[in-house]
Image (spheres, rainbow, N blue to C red):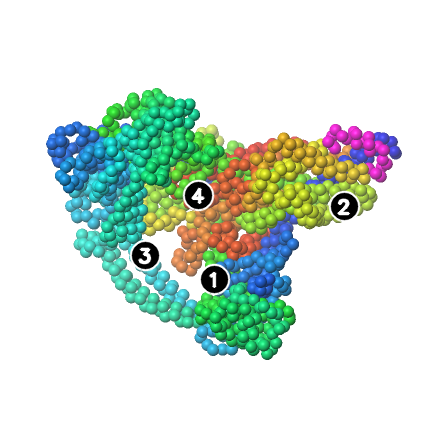
C-alpha cells in the first residue's frame, strides 16, 4: 500500500478532514461564547462588587504626604501598579476618585485606621473621617456611634414632620394652582381677563360665573395665605431644630504641611512630650513665626499635634508610626456635617464579615427602594426601576390584545391570499425597522399630533379646523355614508343563502364602506372646530403634548408588536389540527373552538411572546430618549395620588439612566459605580425575562410532543 | 343532535340549523353572535397591523414632503401712498420733486407700518395695510436756523431699527428709533375702542398714530413708531457721499445699554469706515458717545493675475461691512472686490491678499450683502449673480466667487437679501423677479411680468415672508411662501460650497448658534457614517457568526447544541445600552492604552487555532478519535491563551515595527509609512498564500511530499503550515516595502490619527450585537437542510467537512445570505452603541481609528432639541425615512431570498 496513488489519497485524506477550518470555525464559536460569558462575568463582578464596603486605606507618598481611599481596582501597566482609589470628601478635595501610581508611594502596604468612619451623605457623596465632636451632647469617643444612631433616629422623626409640613404646603400650592386653572377656564369661556379686571376694579360688566370664580379665587387665596404662613413657620422651626445637630469630623486629606525630617525611632518617649522637638521634626517652625504646639497622643500609633500658625487658624497635624523607620505627617481638615444629611455611617475598617454583609444588604436595599441623590449618582434607583416597570406593564397591556388578535386573524381567520401576504410583509418590516425610527414616529405622531390634539384641539395638533357650517354638512354626509354601509352590510348578510358573485361583491363593498366611514370619523375629529382640547387651560404648558409615560408605552408597544405576533402565531400553529377538528365535530362554533380549545393550548406560547416582548421593551432605550424618559423626574408615574396612574408624566428609565449618568452627567467618573450596578440590574431583569421565556418555550414543546395524536 | 351534524354547513342544512336556533334560542344566538363579533374584531385587529405600518410610513412622509413643496411668489396690488396734510403743504412750499424720492424704507416685524426716509432727512410713516399716512418726523431744527443738509443716500440696518444717512456735505448721520409693540387684552382698552377693533375682525384700526389689530389669540396688538432720534452728523468726507453701508448692534443688560454702529461710506475718490458707540448708563446717566473713522484714498492697484501695473481707480459700486464688523468689502464697476481693514493712524488698509476679480467681466450692476454678512452678492449686466466670500485656501484665506447663478437674460437691476434665510430676490431690467437660494444655487420662485420701474426699490420685511416694492407714489407687497428654502435634493445629497470652505463639500452642521449662520444639511456624511458602522461591524460579525453557526450546526452534537443555544440567545438579549456603556467606558480605554496588543491578539488567536489544528493532525487517528471530546474545551482555551501570548510579545514587536507606539506612528506622518502597509498587507498576503498553497503549488508540493513516508504526511502538513506563515510575513514585508518605495502613505485615506471612540471599537461592539442574530438565522438555515443529503454525502465516503462545504453550505447559501442581510439591517439602525461609542463627528473617511456619526445617533441627539417645524426638524425626519428605507430594502431582500430558499429546501 505504498503506491503513489495511496500516498496521494492519504495526503488528500488529511486535507479532506479540513482540520484547520474546523478549528477556525470552532474557534469562532468559542469566541462568540466567550464574548457573552466575559461580558456577563464582567458586569456581574462590577455590579456586585460596587456596593461592597471596602477598607479605607491610607498610603504614604514619596514626598511624605498621604493619600487615602477605598481601593476600587488595581491594574498593572508600564511596570507600575495603578491604584484606583475612591477618595471621597468631594466638597473638600473636589474629586471622588483618584489614580495613584505605585511608583509614587513610599510604602506599598497601606494602613487602615480602625477609628475611621465612612459617612454616606445626602449631598457631596461619601465622607471619610474621624469623628471628633457632637454638637448636641458631650460624650466620650467610645459612645459616638451610639449617640449618632440615637441622634439620627430623632432627626428622622423631625424629617418626617418636615416632610409632612412640606406635603401640606405642596397641597395648598396645588389647590391654588387648581383655582387658577378654574379661573383660566372661565376666562377662556368668557374671553375676558379676570385678573386684570379684578386689579382695575371693573368687575361690573362680568357674567355671574366669572364673578363667582373671582370670589372663589379670592377666598381660596385668603385661606391659603393664612395656612401658608403657619406652615412656613413650622417648617422654619423644624429646619432650625434639624440643623442644630451636627458632627465635627477630621478628614484625613493629604495636606502637605510638613515632612518629618527624622525617622520616627529618634522620637523617644520623652521627646514625644517635647513640643519643640516635634515642631522641629515636622518642620513647621521655619514657616510659622511663633507656633504654639500642643501634643496629645491618641491611641497607640497616633500623635495629634495642634499647631497654631500665623493666621491663627488651628490645624491639626497627624503623625503616624509605621514600624520603626518611616513616618510621615499630613494634615487634617475639620469638617462639620449635619446629622440630617447622614444616610448611613459605619467604622469601615473595623467591620466584621457579617457587619459588612449587613451594610451590603442595606446598600442594595437603598439602591432598589431609595430615591436618587446627587442627580442620580448616589442613592437609589427606585424611580427608574418603577418607571421602567410601570412603562413595561402598560406597554404589554397595550401590545397584548393587538398582537394576539393579529395572530389569531392570520392563523385562524384569514384566507391565503394577497391580503395575508401583505400583512406578513408588514409585520416583517415592522420587526426590522430600527427602534429609533419608532421613537421618531412616536414623537411626531403620539406626542405632537395626538398629544397636541388632546391638549388643545385640532389647532394645537397642526390641523386647520373647518368652519362650523362645512363641518356640520360633512357630519351629515358621514351619517349618510354610515347608513349606506349599514344597509350594504345587512344586504350582504341577507344574501347568505345564495352563493352569488353579488354577495361577495356586496361584502367587499360593505367592508370598504365601513373603512371609509371610519376614516371619515377620524377626519371629522381632526377638522372639528368645536373641540378645544381637554387641557386648554394649562396651555402653553403641554400636558400630553410632550414625551410622557403613555406615549412611551404606546411607542414601545408598536415596537414589540411583531415579537408578540410571531410568538403567538407559532404557538397557535403548534396546536394540533386534530384538536380543532374534534371541537368542530362536537358542534362547537369557531369562536368557541378558539376560546375553549385553541387559546388554552396556546397559552404558554402566548405568554412566552408576552415575556419576550417585555424583555425587549425593558431593554430598549433609543426611542425612550425621544418620547419621555428624563434623567431626573420629581414625581413617580404611578403613586398614591389621585388618579394614581399619571400617563402625562415624564418618567425615569433604567436603561436611559445608564446612558445619561454615564455620558451626560457632569461627573460621569463619579457615577460609574452606580452605572455598573444599574447595568447589572437591567441585564438581570432582561435576562431573567428571556430565560423564563426560553424555559417556557422548551416546556411547551415537550408538552405538545407528548400530546400529539 | 341535529346541530352537531349541521356544523359542516351545506346550504339546506343551514336553514335547518336556523330552525334549531328557534328551539334553543338563548345559547345558539349567543354562540352565533359571539362568533360574528369575534370574527369582526379579529379581522379589524389583523388589518389594523397593516394600517399601523402604513401609519409609520405616512407620518414620516407627512413630515418630509413639506420640505420639497415648491415656493411661490405672489404679486399684490399696488397701494398708493396717501399724502398727509402737512406733507403736501411741505411739498407745496418746497416744490421740488426730489424731496418726495425714497432713499430707504423699512417695516416692523408684524408688517403693520412702513417708513420712508426722504432726502430732506425726514421720515414718513405709513400703514402697510392701506397706505394711510400716520406721522411725519422731521430732523430737529438747527441752531442757526438753516435747513438740514440734504441726504444723498441712506441705508437701513439689518434689524430695521435705524438708518444711516450719507449727507451732501460728506458727513454721515444715524437716526435711531424704536417700534413700540405691545399686546393688550380687551379689558385693557376702553369699551368703545375695544368694540371698534373687534368689529373690524382682524383688520387694523388706526388711532393716535398707533395701529391696533385683534390677533387670533384674542388679544389686541398695538404697533407704534416712536422716538426717532437724530444723532449729530459725523463729518467724514469732503465730498458728497455716494454709497453707504450700516450695521447697528444693540446690547442691553439690566444696568446699561450700549449701541455700536459700524458704517462704511464712499465718495468718488475716498473710502471710509467708521465706528460709533453710545453707552447709556443706567438710571438717567448721560449717554456717552464716541466715534472713530478710518479713511483711504481710492488709488489704482494691480489686480491679481493682471499684467498691467495698476488699473485706474474706479468708483465704489457696493459696500459691505463684514459680519464681525472688523472689515469692509468694496466692489467697483469692473467687478473688483477688495477687502479693507482699519489700520494705524486712522488709515484704512487695502488687504492685498483679499482681492479678487469676478470672472465675469461684464459690468457690475447691483450688489447686496447676504444674511450673515460673510458673502457679498453681485449682479452683472449679463444677468448672472455671483456670491463672493472669504474662503480658506492652502495659502491662508482669500476672497473667491463661491456661487455663480445665471438668473436672467437681461441685466440685473437690483438685489435684495432676506433677513431670515440665505435667499435673495433678483430684479432684472425687463421686470422679472427671481427668488434664489444662494447656497444651493437654486431659483425657488419667480415672477415674470412685474411692472417694475427704475424708481422702484425692493426690501424684505423682517420675517422674510414678504417682499416690499416701493417708490415715491406707492408700494406693493409680494408674499413669498417659502417655508424651507434650505431644503432641496441638492442640499441634502450634493456637494455645496459653503461660506468659509475651500471647496464644495458634504457637510452636516445643523446648529449654527444664530440665525445668521449658514445651515449645512448634507445627509451624505451621516449616510456614510451609517455605512461605515455597518461595514466594520459586518467585517467582524459576519465571519464569526457564519463560521460559528457552521460549527454549531455540523460539528456539535445535539445535546451540546441545546446547551449552547440559550447562551447565544442570552447574547441577543443584552440591551444595546449596556453594550454601548461597556464599549465606551471599559473597552475604549483598554484599546487606547494598548491598541497594538488588541490588534495583535487577533493575529495570535488565528495563528494559535491553525497551529492547534496542525498539531491535532499529528496525533494518530486512533488516539485522536477518543480525544475528540477534548477538542471543544481546547478551543475555548485558545483565545485567552492567545491574548496572554499577545500581551507577552506585543510590546517588543510594536517597538520594533513602529519605533515607538502605534498611536504615535499613526499621528505622526513624518515617520515611514512601512509599518502601516505591513499591517494592511497581512490579510491580502494571507489570502494569496492560502490560494497558492491550495491551488497552483499543490502539484509541486505533492511531488516534494512523495519523498516522505506515510507517517510523515501530518508532519509535512505542519511544516507546510509554518512555511506558509513565514511566507505570509515575507510577502507582507515585500509589498509593504514596495508601497513605501512608491511613496504611497497609508495614513492618507486608509489609516489616520487615533481617536478613543473609533470605528474599529464600535465595529466590535456592534458585532457583538448582531452576531447572535446572524448566528441564530444561519443555524436555522443550516438545520433546515434535509438530513438525507448529509447521509448520502457521508455514505459516499465524504468527510464531515467535505459534506459541510460541498453539500450543506451550498444548499443553505441563500438562507445564510438572508441571515447576513437581516444582520445588516439591524446594524444600520442600531442607535445606542453608536451614540455612546462612535464619537459622533460627521466626518467622511475610512480610517478605522476614527469615529463617525450615523443617521440613528443624529436622530437620537438632535431631534429632542430641534425646534418643531424648522427645516432642521423636517430634515431629521428625512434621515429617519432614509433609515427606514435602508432597513426596508435589507429586510425585503432577505425575506425574498429566504422564501426562495424555503421553496428550494422543500423541493429537495
Q: Which mark is residue B428?
A: none
Q: CA distance from mark 3 to mark 4?
A: 33 Å
Q: CA distance from mark 2 to mark 3?
A: 77 Å
Of tags 4 and 2, the one toward the viewer is 4
Residue A477 vertical placement versus A393 (above, below)? above
Q: Which mark is residue B863?
A: 4
Q: Residue B875: image x %, image y %?
A: 43, 37
Q: Which mark is residue B628?
A: 2
Q: Which mark is residue A178?
A: 3
Using the image as rendered, state which of residue B576 and residue B257 is in the foreground: B257
In contact (CB < 8 Å): disc 4 and disc 2: no
Pinpoint the chain carrying mark 2: B
Q: Is residue B334 left or right of residue A703?
A: left
Q: CA distance from mark 4 to mark 2?
A: 56 Å
Residue A668 vertical placement versus A575 (above, below)? below
In contact (CB < 8 Å): disc 4 and disc 1: no
Answer few, some or many: residues within 10 Å of disc 4's Cα (few below 14, many 20 plus, some between 14 and 19).
many
| Span colored in magenta | B692-713
Residue under disc 3 on the same chain as residue under disc 1: yes
Using the image as rendered, state which of residue B157 and residue B609 is in the foreground: B157
Q: Residue B387: image x %, image y %?
A: 38, 30
Residue B672's image quarter? top right
Q: CA distance from mark 4 to mark 1?
A: 36 Å
B697 magenta-colored: yes
Amino acid at each position: 500500500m505504498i503506491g503513489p496513488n495511496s500516498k496521494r489519497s492519504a495526503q488528500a485524506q488529511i486535507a479532506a478532514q479540513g482540520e484547520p477550518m474546523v478549528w477556525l470555525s470552532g474557534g469562532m464559536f468559542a469566541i462568540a461564547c466567550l464574548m457573552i460569558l466575559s461580558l456577563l462575568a464582567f458586569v456581574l463582578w462590577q455590579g456586585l462588587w460596587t456596593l461592597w464596603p471596602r477598607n479605607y486605606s491610607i498610603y504614604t507618598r514619596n514626598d511624605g504626604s498621604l493619600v487615602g481611599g477605598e481601593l476600587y481596582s488595581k491594574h498593572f501597566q508600564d511596570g507600575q501598579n495603578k491604584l484606583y482609589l475612591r477618595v471621597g470628601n468631594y466638597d473638600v478635595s473636589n474629586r471622588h476618585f483618584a489614580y495613584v501610581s505605585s511608583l509614587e508611594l513610599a510604602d506599598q502596604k497601606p494602613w487602615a485606621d480602625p477609628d475611621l468612619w465612612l459617612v454616606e451623605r445626602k449631598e457631596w457623596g461619601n465622607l471619610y473621617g474621624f469623628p471628633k465632636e457632637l454638637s448636641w451632647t458631650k460624650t466620650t469617643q467610645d459612645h459616638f456611634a451610639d449617640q449618632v444612631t440615637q441622634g439620627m433616629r430623632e432627626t428622622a422623626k423631625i424629617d418626617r414632620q418636615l416632610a409632612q409640613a412640606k406635603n401640606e404646603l405642596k397641597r395648598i400650592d396645588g389647590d391654588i394652582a387648581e383655582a387658577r386653572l378654574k379661573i383660566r377656564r372661565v376666562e377662556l369661556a368668557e374671553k375676558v381677563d379676570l385678573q386684570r379686571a379684578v386689579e382695575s376694579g371693573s368687575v361690573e360688566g362680568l357674567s355671574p360665573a366669572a364673578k363667582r370664580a373671582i370670589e372663589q379665587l379670592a377666598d381660596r387665596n385668603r385661606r391659603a395665605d393664612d395656612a401658608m404662613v403657619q406652615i412656613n413657620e413650622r417648617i422654619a422651626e423644624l429646619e432650625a431644630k434639624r440643623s442644630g445637630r451636627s458632627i465635627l469630623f477630621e478628614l484625613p486629606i493629604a495636606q502637605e504641611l510638613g515632612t518629618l525630617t527624622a525617622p520616627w525611632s529618634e522620637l523617644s518617649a520623652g521627646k514625644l512630650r517635647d513640643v519643640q522637638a516635634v515642631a522641629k521634626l515636622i518642620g513647621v517652625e521655619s514657616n510659622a513665626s511663633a507656633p504654639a504646639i500642643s501634643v496629645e497622643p491618641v491611641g497607640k500609633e497616633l500623635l495629634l499635634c495642634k499647631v497654631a500658625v500665623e493666621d491663627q487658624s488651628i490645624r491639626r497635624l497627624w503623625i503616624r508610626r509605621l514600624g520603626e523607620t518611616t513616618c510621615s505627617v499630613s494634615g487634617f481638615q475639620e469638617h462639620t456635617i449635619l446629622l440630617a444629611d447622614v444616610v448611613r455611617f459605619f467604622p469601615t475598617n473595623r467591620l466584621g464579615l457579617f457587619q459588612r454583609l449587613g451594610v451590603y444588604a442595606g446598600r442594595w436595599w437603598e439602591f432598589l427602594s431609595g430615591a436618587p441623590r446627587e442627580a442620580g449618582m448616589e442613592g437609589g434607583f427606585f424611580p427608574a426601576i418603577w418607571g421602567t416597570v410601570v412603562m413595561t406593564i402598560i406597554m404589554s397591556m397595550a401590545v397584548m390584545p393587538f398582537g394576539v388578535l393579529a395572530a389569531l386573524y392570520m392563523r385562524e381567520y384569514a384566507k391565503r391570499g394577497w391580503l395575508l401576504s401583505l400583512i406578513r410583509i408588514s409585520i416583517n418590516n415592522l420587526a426590522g425597522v430600527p427602534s429609533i425610527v419608532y421613537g421618531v414616529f412616536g414623537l411626531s405622531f403620539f406626542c405632537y399630533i395626538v398629544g397636541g390634539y388632546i391638549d388643545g384641539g385640532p389647532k394645537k395638533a397642526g390641523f386647520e379646523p373647518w368652519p362650523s357650517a362645512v363641518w356640520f354638512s360633512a357630519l351629515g354626509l358621514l351619517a349618510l355614508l354610515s347608513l349606506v354601509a349599514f344597509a350594504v352590510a345587512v344586504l350582504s348578510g341577507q344574501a347568505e343563502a345564495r352563493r352569488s358573485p353579488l354577495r361577495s361583491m356586496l361584502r367587499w363593498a360593505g367592508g370598504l364602506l365601513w373603512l371609509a366611514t371610519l376614516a371619515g370619523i377620524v377626519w371629522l375629529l381632526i377638522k372639528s372646530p368645536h373641540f378645544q382640547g381637554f387641557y386648554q387651560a394649562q396651555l402653553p404648558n403641554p400636558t400630553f403634548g410632550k414625551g410622557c409615560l403613555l406615549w412611551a408605552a404606546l411607542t414601545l408597544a408598536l415596537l414589540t408588536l411583531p415579537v408578540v405576533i410571531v410568538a403567538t402565531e407559532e404557538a397557535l400553529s403548534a396546536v394540533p389540527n386534530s384538536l380543532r377538528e374534534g371541537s368542530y365535530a362536537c358542534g362547537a362554533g369557531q369562536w368557541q373552538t378558539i376560546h375553549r380549545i385553541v387559546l388554552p393550548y396556546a397559552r404558554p406560547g402566548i405568554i412566552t411572546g408576552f415575556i419576550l416582548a417585555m424583555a425587549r421593551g425593558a431593554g430598549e432605550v433609543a426611542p425612550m430618549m425621544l418620547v419621555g424618559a428624563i434623567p431626573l423626574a420629581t414625581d413617580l408615574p404611578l403613586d398614591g395620588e389621585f388618579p394614581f396612574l399619571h400617563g402625562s408624566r415624564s418618567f425615569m428609565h433604567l436603561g436611559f439612566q445608564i446612558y445619561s449618568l454615564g455620558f451626560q452627567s457632569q461627573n460621569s467618573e463619579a457615577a460609574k459605580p452606580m452605572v455598573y450596578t444599574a447595568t447589572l440590574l437591567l441585564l438581570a431583569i432582561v435576562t431573567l425575562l428571556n430565560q423564563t421565556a426560553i424555559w417556557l418555550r422548551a416546556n411547551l414543546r415537550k408538552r405538545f410532543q407528548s400530546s400529539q395524536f | 343532535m341535529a346541530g352537531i351534524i349541521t356544523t359542516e354547513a351545506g346550504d339546506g342544512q343551514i336553514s335547518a340549523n336556523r330552525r334549531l336556533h328557534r328551539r334553543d334560542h338563548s345559547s345558539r344566538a349567543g354562540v352565533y353572535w359571539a362568533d360574528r363579533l369575534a370574527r369582526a374584531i379579529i379581522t379589524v385587529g389583523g388589518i389594523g397591523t397593516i394600517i399601523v405600518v402604513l401609519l409609520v410610513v405616512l407620518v414620516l412622509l407627512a413630515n418630509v414632503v413639506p420640505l420639497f413643496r415648491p415656493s411661490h411668489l405672489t404679486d399684490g396690488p399696488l397701494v398708493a401712498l396717501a399724502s398727509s396734510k402737512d406733507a403736501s403743504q411741505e411739498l407745496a412750499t418746497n416744490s421740488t420733486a426730489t424731496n418726495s424720492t425714497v432713499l430707504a424704507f423699512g417695516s416692523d416685524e408684524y408688517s403693520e407700518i412702513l417708513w420712508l426716509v426722504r432726502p430732506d432727512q425726514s421720515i414718513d410713516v405709513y400703514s402697510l395695510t392701506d397706505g394711510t399716512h400716520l406721522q411725519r418726523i422731521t430732523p430737529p431744527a438747527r441752531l442757526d436756523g438753516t435747513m438740514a443738509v440734504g441726504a444723498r443716500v441712506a441705508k437701513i440696518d439689518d434689524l430695521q431699527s435705524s438708518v444711516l444717512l450719507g449727507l451732501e456735505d460728506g458727513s454721515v448721520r444715524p437716526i435711531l428709533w424704536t417700534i413700540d409693540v405691545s399686546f393688550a387684552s380687551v379689558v385693557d382698552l376702553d369699551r368703545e375702542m375695544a368694540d371698534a377693533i373687534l368689529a373690524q375682525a382682524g383688520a387694523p384700526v388706526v388711532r393716535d398714530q398707533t395701529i391696533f389689530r385683534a390677533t387670533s389669540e384674542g388679544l389686541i396688538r398695538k404697533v407704534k413708531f416712536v422716538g426717532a432720534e437724530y444723532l449729530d452728523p459725523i463729518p467724514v468726507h469732503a465730498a458728497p457721499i455716494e454709497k453707504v453701508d450700516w450695521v447697528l448692534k444693540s446690547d442691553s443688560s439690566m444696568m446699561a445699554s450700549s449701541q455700536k454702529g459700524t458704517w462704511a461710506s464712499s465718495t468718488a475718490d475716498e473710502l471710509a469706515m467708521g465706528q460709533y458707540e453710545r453707552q447709556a448708563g443706567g438710571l438717567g446717566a448721560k449717554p456717552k458717545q464716541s466715534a472713530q473713522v478710518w479713511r483711504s484714498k481710492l488709488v489704482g492697484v494691480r489686480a491679481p493675475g493682471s499684467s498691467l501695473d495698476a488699473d485706474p481707480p474706479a468708483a465704489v459700486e457696493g459696500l459691505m461691512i463684514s459680519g464681525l464688523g472688523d472689515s469692509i468689502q468694496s466692489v467697483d464697476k469692473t467687478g473688483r472686490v477688495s477687502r479693507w481693514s482699519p489700520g494705524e493712524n486712522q488709515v484704512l488698509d487695502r488687504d492685498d491678499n483679499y482681492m479678487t476679480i469676478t470672472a465675469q467681466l461684464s459690468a457690475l450692476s447691483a450688489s447686496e450683502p447676504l444674511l450673515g454678512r460673510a458673502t457679498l452678492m453681485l449682479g452683472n449686466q449679463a444677468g448672472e449673480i455671483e456670491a463672493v466670500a472669504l474662503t480658506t485656501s492652502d495659502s491662508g484665506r482669500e476672497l473667491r466667487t463661491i456661487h455663480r447663478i445665471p438668473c436672467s437674460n437681461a441685466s440685473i437691476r437690483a438685489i435684495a437679501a432676506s433677513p431670515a434665510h440665505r435667499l435673495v430676490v433678483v430684479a432684472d431690467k425687463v421686470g422679472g423677479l427671481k427668488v434664489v437660494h444662494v447656497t444651493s444655487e437654486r431659483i425657488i420662485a419667480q415672477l415674470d411680468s412685474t411692472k417694475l420701474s427704475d424708481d422702484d426699490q425692493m426690501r424684505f420685511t423682517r420675517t422674510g415672508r414678504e417682499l416690499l416694492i416701493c417708490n415715491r407714489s406707492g408700494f406693493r407687497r409680494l408674499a413669498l411662501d417659502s417655508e424651507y428654502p434650505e431644503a432641496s435634493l441638492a442640499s441634502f445629497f450634493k456637494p455645496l460650497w459653503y461660506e468659509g470652505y475651500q471647496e464644495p463639500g458634504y457637510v452636516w452642521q445643523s446648529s449654527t448658534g444664530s440665525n445668521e449662520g449658514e445651515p449645512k444639511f448634507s445627509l451624505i456624511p451621516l449616510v456614510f457614517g451609517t455605512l461605515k458602522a455597518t461595514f466594520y461591524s459586518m467585517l467582524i460579525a459576519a465571519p464569526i457568526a457564519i463560521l460559528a453557526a457552521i460549527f454549531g450546526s455540523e460539528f456539535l452534537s445535539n445535546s451540546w447544541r441545546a446547551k449552547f443555544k440559550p447562551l447565544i440567545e442570552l447574547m441577543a438579549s443584552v440591551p444595546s445600552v449596556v453594550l454601548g456603556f461597556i464599549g465606551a467606558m471599559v473597552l475604549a480605554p483598554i484599546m487606547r492604552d494598548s491598541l497594538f496588543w488588541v490588534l495583535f491578539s487577533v493575529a495570535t488567536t488565528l495563528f494559535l487555532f491553525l497551529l492547534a489544528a496542525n498539531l491535532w493532525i499529528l496525533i494518530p487517528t486512533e488516539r485522536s478519535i477518543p480525544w475528540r471530546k477534548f477538542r471543544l474545551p481546547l478551543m475555548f482555551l485558545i483565545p485567552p491563551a492567545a491574548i496572554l501570548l499577545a500581551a507577552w510579545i506585543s510590546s517588543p514587536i510594536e517597538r520594533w515595527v513602529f519605533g515607538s507606539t502605534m498611536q504615535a506612528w499613526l499621528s505622526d506622518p513624518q515617520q515611514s509609512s512601512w509599518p502601516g502597509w505591513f499591517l494592511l498587507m497581512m490579510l491580502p498576503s494571507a489570502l494569496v498564500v492560502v490560494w497558492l498553497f491550495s491551488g497552483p503549488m499543490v502539484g509541486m508540493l505533492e511531488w516534494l511530499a512523495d519523498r516522505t513516508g506515510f507517517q510523515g504526511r501530518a508532519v509535512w502538513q505542519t511544516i507546510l503550515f509554518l512555511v506558509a506563515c513565514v511566507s505570509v510575513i515575507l510577502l507582507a514585508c515585500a509589498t509593504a516595502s514596495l508601497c513605501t518605495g512608491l511613496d504611497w502613505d497609508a495614513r492618507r485615506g486608509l489609516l489616520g490619527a487615533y481617536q478613543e471612540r473609533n470605528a474599529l471599537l464600535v465595529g466590535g461592539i456592534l458585532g457583538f450585537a448582531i452576531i447572535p442574530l446572524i448566528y441564530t438565522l444561519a443555524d436555522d438555515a443550516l438545520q433546515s437542510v434535509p438530513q438525507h443529503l448529509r447521509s448520502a454525502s457521508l455514505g459516499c465516503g465524504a468527510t464531515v467537512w467535505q459534506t459541510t462545504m460541498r453539500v450543506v453550505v451550498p444548499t443553505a447559501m441563500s438562507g445564510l445570505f438572508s441571515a447576513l442581510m437581516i444582520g445588516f439591517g439591524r446594524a444600520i439602525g442600531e442607535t445606542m452603541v453608536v451614540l455612546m461609542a462612535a464619537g459622533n463627528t460627521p466626518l467622511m473617511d475610512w480610517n478605522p481609528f476614527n469615529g463617525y456619526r450615523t443617521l440613528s445617533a443624529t436622530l437620537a441627539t438632535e431631534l429632542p432639541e430641534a425646534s418643531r417645524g424648522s427645516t432642521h426638524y423636517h430634515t431629521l425626519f428625512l434621515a429617519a425615512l432614509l433609515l427606514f428605507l435602508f432597513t426596508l430594502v435589507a429586510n425585503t431582500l432577505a425575506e425574498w431570498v429566504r422564501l426562495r430558499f424555503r421553496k428550494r429546501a422543500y423541493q429537495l
